[in-house]
Image: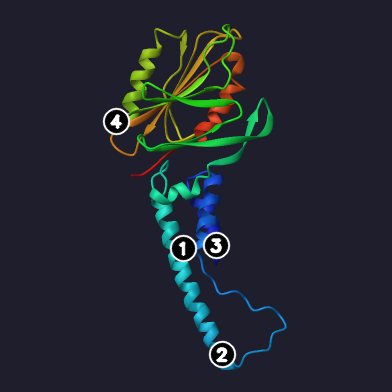
Amino acid sequence: MERNLKERLLEESRYDDNVKEDIWRELEARLDLEPVAPAGLPKRNRKQRRSTKMRTVRITATVAAAALLAIGVFLAMPAGTAFMKDAKNWFAPQKKVEVEVEGEKEQTDQQLHQNEESRYVIYYDKERYKLVQQDGKDVVTTKEPLPAQYPEVSLTIEQNKDVSPEELIKRLSESLAGQYAQVGEVEKVTEPFEGYRVRASDGKKWDSKVIVLYTTANGKQGSFALTEKYFLEASEGHGARFEQMLKQFRVLDE
């Protein structure tokens, strides 16, 4: 039964594998099952066995009901949200995350950032980047400033409380027209989260500026805008790392 519950959680949930495993471990820690007696102990009489069997059935049924309820609530929650206050227990302050960069997979040490005011969390690669707050925005940028000849490299997260994701991406896309030579069409996406995306670039040279804009719901009436900026040669480097960070972005419920 325990295996079936775990499989349902892992298969049907819309969260990524790391979060699902964290949630299952939290559930396991709360299940208080009677341990199995070691082999070699004296056999109990029929009455004792019957009593123990009935008690085990009751415990199993209670545990199953509680676990199913917890999983049911989890599965019913909108994608991109977390378990209210208990969510903090499932988001470790730091964790290892695998990232594929230029065709090679590597393990990175990632730091949790929780924005209490905007109600979201995200992990970022603490070895290569720092997170700073600028004008009410959270900005992930390189730890060491890049030389002057390199365009900006950053991932910016900003909340707009009054505009829907669909309307916001439309406005942002229109604003790119006078800044970038090539602006793509707005796309509806499910990765790295549910929302909208538009890409733009300023040419095909190694240092041509690239921008990728995402919008997603903030759980209320507004939205988040998440903006990646880098240059063409860094698409498989900084670009891939930013995409991985966005997979760790979660909006928290009130």
Residue at horizontal 45%, vertical 57%?
71
Amino acid type of the residue tagged 4 in the rendering: Lys
Q: What is the spatial separation of the Cα atoms under label 4 and label 2, in whole angstroms?
A: 62 Å
Instruction: Give the labeled residue for mark 2.
Output: 48
* SS class, disc 3: helix
Q: Are marks 4 and 1 in contact (CB under 8 Å)?
A: no
How far, Cα to Cα, is label 3 from label 4? Answer: 40 Å
Q: Which residue is mark 3?
A: 4
- Which residue bears the numbered disc 4? 161
Query: Relative to residue 95, is residue 104 depicted above or below?
Result: above
**Of residues 182 and 141, the one drawn nearer to the viewer in this rendering:** 141
Density class for disc 2 (Cα within 10 Å; few <14, some 14-19, many ≥20) is few
Question: How many angstroms separate mark 2 from mark 3 (CA)?
Answer: 29 Å
Q: Badge 3: few (under 14), some or many (20 or more) residues near its Cα, within 10 Å? A: few
Q: Residue 188 location, x and y as percent? A: 42, 30
- Image quadrant in which the N terminus is located: bottom right
Quadrant location, the C terminus: top left
